[in-house]
């Protein structure tokens, strides 16, 4: 059992999931939200959790050793910086911040204060994705040539951020990890149909130095839910579909034959890939606790969140320029496959 005691800041739809999960892990100390009615409603379900009226009270509580920030993204920088400076470890939901420079400052502060800063990029903790990364690292797929990701739903329509910022961070984060480097260039296009200047649909294209390409299609204006990641390798192809009840991860042979002077693709038969059972959010939250308790680097540290922000900002810039290519800023740190 972890000795870490956590206060969850932000009790909206996703914050409630964090409250439930940290309570399951027996480390929930308190909840904080500016919406007092929201925290009071949670207190009925989690009577042992302390209700905080303001953020300073959380920071001043010596029993709170870590915080989980699930507030709207525009508050991530302010809340996280205050927590780090108060000596708290921080788990912050995606995106890490709204500007990559702010994210870099958060990383520097965490390093100076010797505190854990972890970003909630959930896909990295999905057992199927962990298995997929193992297959790629083992060379089963060969050289990665192309990746596409669809994240679509008739979902909650947001006012504070567009579909790119709401949906794409997970996919960008995973693609960067699978390829093992930052893209050299991005382009993005989209459309705002429900609210002015807030894109409901975007398509982002990433070009990497080694020739690998990726595209990310996101929308909250789609008739059905789809979460599909396809990785095309020089040897085999992999498909991850989280919305499927089974066969979530499959491998397909890549077989091209020359017939009568023309290339012909042989329709592949898919093979289901087994992986351990486990709830991604529970695994992610447990990982954060282990990193705090053992003082070790998380799988999705703040640096990883900064890289995602750089790509997001480049895509947003291209979106504003109607799809013109944008070069991606490079961090000084070497990009590592996390």
Image (spheres, grey):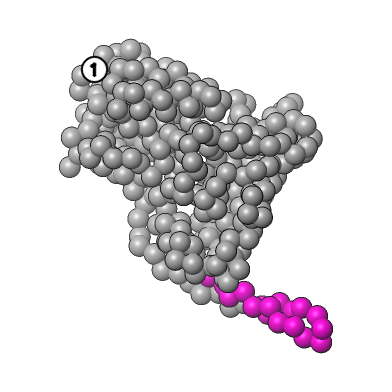
Residue placed furthest toward the bottom: 260
Which residue is painted at 51% across and 33% down in the image?
332
The x and y percentages for residue 98 are 55, 26
Inspect this view and state whether residue 128 appears: no
Residue 163, picture quadrant:
top right
Is 138 situated left or right of 220 in this image?
left
Q: Which residue is mark 1?
A: 61
Quadrant for the N terminus in the image? top left
Which residue is painted at 38% across and 45% down in the image?
299
Query: In the image, is residue 283 above or below residue 111?
Result: below
Query: In the image, is residue 24 above or below residue 82?
Result: below
Is 271 situated left or right of 35 in this image?
right
Residue 28, picture quadrant:
top left
The x and y percentages for residue 225 are 59, 51
Instruction: Say if the magenta span includes residue 317.
Output: no
Residue 268, picture quadrant:
bottom right
Q: How many marks?
A: 1
Q: Secondary structure at mark 1?
A: loop
Q: Which residues are magenta?
A: 251-267
Inspect this view and state whether residue 273 appears: yes
Is 39 situated left or right of 169 in this image?
left
The residue closer to the viewer here, 118 or 49, is: 118
């Amino acid at each position: 059992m972890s000795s870490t005691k956590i206060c969850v800041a932000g009790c909206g739809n996703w914050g409630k999931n964090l409250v439930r999960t940290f309570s399951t892990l027996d480390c929930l100390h308190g909840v904080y939200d500016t919406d007092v009615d929201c925290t009071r409603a949670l207190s009925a379900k989690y009577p042992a959790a302390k209700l905080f009226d303001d953020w300073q009270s959380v920071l001043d509580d010596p029993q709170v050793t870590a915080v989980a920030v699930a507030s709207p993204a525009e508050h991530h920088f302010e809340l996280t910086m205050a927590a780090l400076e108060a000596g708290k470890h921080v788990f912050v939901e995606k995106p890490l911040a709204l500007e990559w420079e702010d994210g870099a400052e958060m990383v520097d502060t965490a390093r100076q204060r010797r505190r854990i800063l972890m970003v909630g990029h959930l896909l990295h903790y999905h057992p199927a994705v962990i298995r997929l990364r193992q297959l790629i690292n083992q060379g089963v797929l060969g050289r990665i040539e192309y990746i596409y990701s669809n994240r679509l739903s008739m979902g909650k329509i947001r006012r504070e951020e567009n579909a790119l910022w709401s949906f794409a961070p997970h996919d960008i984060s995973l693609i960067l990890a699978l390829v093992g480097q930052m893209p050299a260039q991005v382009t993005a296009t989209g459309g705002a149909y429900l609210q002015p200047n807030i894109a409901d649909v975007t398509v982002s294209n990433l070009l990497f130095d080694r020739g690998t390409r990726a595209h990310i299609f996101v929308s909250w204006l789609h008739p059905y839910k789809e979460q599909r990641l396809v990785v095309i390798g020089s040897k085999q192809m992999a498909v991850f579909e989280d919305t499927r009840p089974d066969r979530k991860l499959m491998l397909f042979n890549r077989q091209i034959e020359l017939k009568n002077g023309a290339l012909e693709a042989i329709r592949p038969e898919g093979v289901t890939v087994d992986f351990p059972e486990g709830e991604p959010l529970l695994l992610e939250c447990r990982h954060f606790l282990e990193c705090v308790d053992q003082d070790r680097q998380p799988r999705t540290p703040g640096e990883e969140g900064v890289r995602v922000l750089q790509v997001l900002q480049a895509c947003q810039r291209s979106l504003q320029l109607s799809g013109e290519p944008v070069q991606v800023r490079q961090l000084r740190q070497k990009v590592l496959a996390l």
